[in-house]
Image (spheres, rainbow, N blue to C red):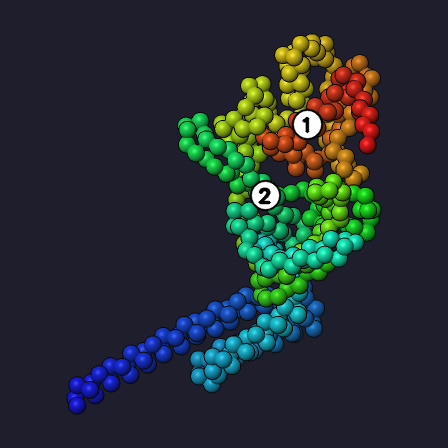
Amino acid sequence: MKKLAYLLYLSLLVFFSCQKDFYLEDLNEVNSQIEALQSQIVVSENEGKSLLSEKEILQTQIIDVQNQLKQQQMTLDEALEKIKELEEKIIEIDGIKDGIYEIVLEKQISTTEGEGLEVLESWWQTDPNTSTFVKIQAREIINHTIYRGYYVGKGSDGDELGWLHTRKLSSFPYYTDLSVIDTSDQNQNYLVNLSKERISLDSLLIIDKKRYRSHNLDDGSSAVFTDKVYTKLVERESFPPLNTEEELTEIFKITGNGFYSDSLYLTLDPSDPYDYIRVFIEDAKRHGVDLSHITNKEPYLHEISIDSEGACAWASDVCDREKIWIEYDSACWEYGLPDPYFADRLQTMYHELGHTILSYDHPMVED
């Protein structure tokens, strides 16, 4: 009988011990949520009297929840309900916070225009290596990361490098304003924001519309598609590590990828517009064309900001025997980092040098 009583005592002791542990875990969770609420209440002297008063009231209510929990005058469930109510009030007062956010979940509804076909995707989690980060200020996305992946194969030491995941900050706007662009005959993708909503203290829900035309249908025809894109974003302290142009150039040159496999282009400084003239002349020489007289021309390469849609650069005074005159858009130049496979800068500069040095016109191409 004594043995049975002792076993019963041990069972009750373990039970209440576990219950206590669960209670403490829940209590810690509630305290963490309270701390999160308090960190959101930033009272500034610059705020209006009404807003200041609302935040001071919220601060008092948060402290009251803490005190009632300590004195066991409120259950954990009641505290969680009160915290949820306070969180909704904070979101209503502050709206969308300025800061840096990462897209962690995505889904979309795809529609084929004119046919009414609709496909709904479920939520899927983004890859931390490739996810997009955005910086929001006054409800606008003012900076965002662009991901590019390169299969770099083996390095100079023979080690398999596999995929190189790279991010850079884009100088292009995140959204395209559909109201000022006629997209009826455009092939490019267009993205426009439909709504931004703060759904928790550190999370946003953004709904966008993406519109694009595809010419790759089986029967050779084209169709216009519209995607309604849902993204959930979580606040982050900063952007992730970003590759500098110098770091990428060094990696590409070491691994000999794309146009960096060419001995001449290995000598190119991709960040120096004037170095493209040198390589252009040397490239012509190895193909039997003597452009040495060009070295007497005065190069004038001017970085500007171009407002017109789609233009990245142009050559001026193409018949001028004294100058090499090219103007290029600063945003396009920054976007066209030394990508070994697409070589945006190289293609742009060679195109314009063909105008200004060789006096080539655009060829006539019939549809």
Decide if residue 125 is on the left or right side of residue 297. left
Q: Is residue 220 above or below residue 59?
A: above
* Quadrant of res 310: top right
**According to the image, label 2 marks what residue?**
147
- At horizontal 74% and vertical 20% (from top left) the residue drawn is 354
Measure how far apart labels 1 and 2 are at the Cα level.
Answer: 21 Å
Tell me residue 45's x, y (percent). 65, 65
SS for callout 1: helix
The image quadrant where one finds the N terminus is bottom left
Decide if residue 330 is on the left or right side of residue 155. right
- At horizontal 54% and vertical 55% (from top left) the residue drawn is 125
Tell me residue 150's x, y (percent). 54, 36
**Number of callouts:** 2
Amino acid carrying label 2: it is Tyr
Decide if residue 136 is on the left or right side of residue 305. left
- At horizontal 63% and vertical 48% (from top left) the residue drawn is 144
Give the class, few, some or many, for how many residues have Cα within 10 Å of label 2's Cα (few <14, many ≥20).
some
Res 233 visible: no
Work out whether residue 101 or residue 57 is closer to the camera in this orientation and state it. 101
Label annotation for residue 347: 1
